[in-house]
Amino acid sequence: MKILIVFMGMLLICAAFVFYQNDMGRYARAQTALKALAEECAAGAALYFDETAYAEGRTVFNETEGRAYISHMLANSRVPAPDVGAAGLIAASVSFYDDRGAYGVSAGPYGVIRHPSVVVRLRVATEDIFRLPFLTVTALEREAMYELPN
């Protein structure tokens, strides 16, 4: 009887390790997909700029077109991942830093902005990714910055 109890305990512990590894793989894939989408949104939004200001030698982003591009990318994406169920839509927060006087401000982990940049932060609510009862992740968030050096 003691062997059965020890075997069942070892089986439960090993099963928990397998579940954790599988769920962690899903979490990593979802984070990577969300990061790639944030980078694509930031890089694409940085391509839209005001042509008249550019002709004068200044870099000024066209925020309306940039936000429309980001909305299009979010509407047509399959993020966070095929095996992670989203519980809502992806929310995007966009910040444009350009020659309109936005230099010298802090962009959090990116430091002080000195060049034209676009920062995109994506957040999506998900179903609980981990199956173990003591681990709960119900939201994913990634941020990316695209900088245009002078």
Image (spheres, rainbow, N blue to C red):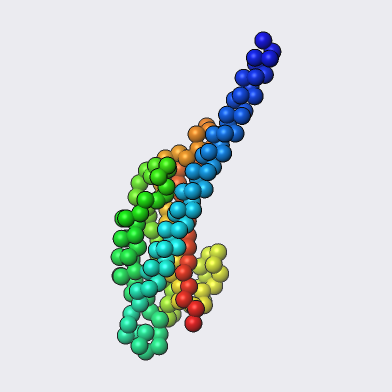
Kindly give the residue lying farthest to the top in the view shown.
1
Q: Residue at x 32, y 55 (%)?
A: 76
Kindly give the residue lying farthest to the right in the view shown.
2
x, y percentage for residue 60?
Answer: 38, 79
Total marks drawn? 0
Residue 53 higher or lower than 67, as above or below: below
Q: Residue at x 54, y 67 (%)?
A: 110
x, y percentage for residue 64?
Answer: 30, 70
Q: Nearer the viewer, residue 10 or 64?
A: 10
Q: Residue at x 56, y 37 (%)?
A: 20
Q: Quadrant of residue 17?
A: top right
x, y percentage for residue 131?
Answer: 50, 34
Residue 123 higher or lower than 5, as above or below: below
Q: Nearer the viewer, residue 52 or 112?
A: 52
x, y percentage for residue 16?
Answer: 58, 31
Q: Would you say residue 102 is visible in this rendering? A: no
Which quadrant does the N terminus fall into? top right
Left or right: 55 as drawn, with respect to 39: left
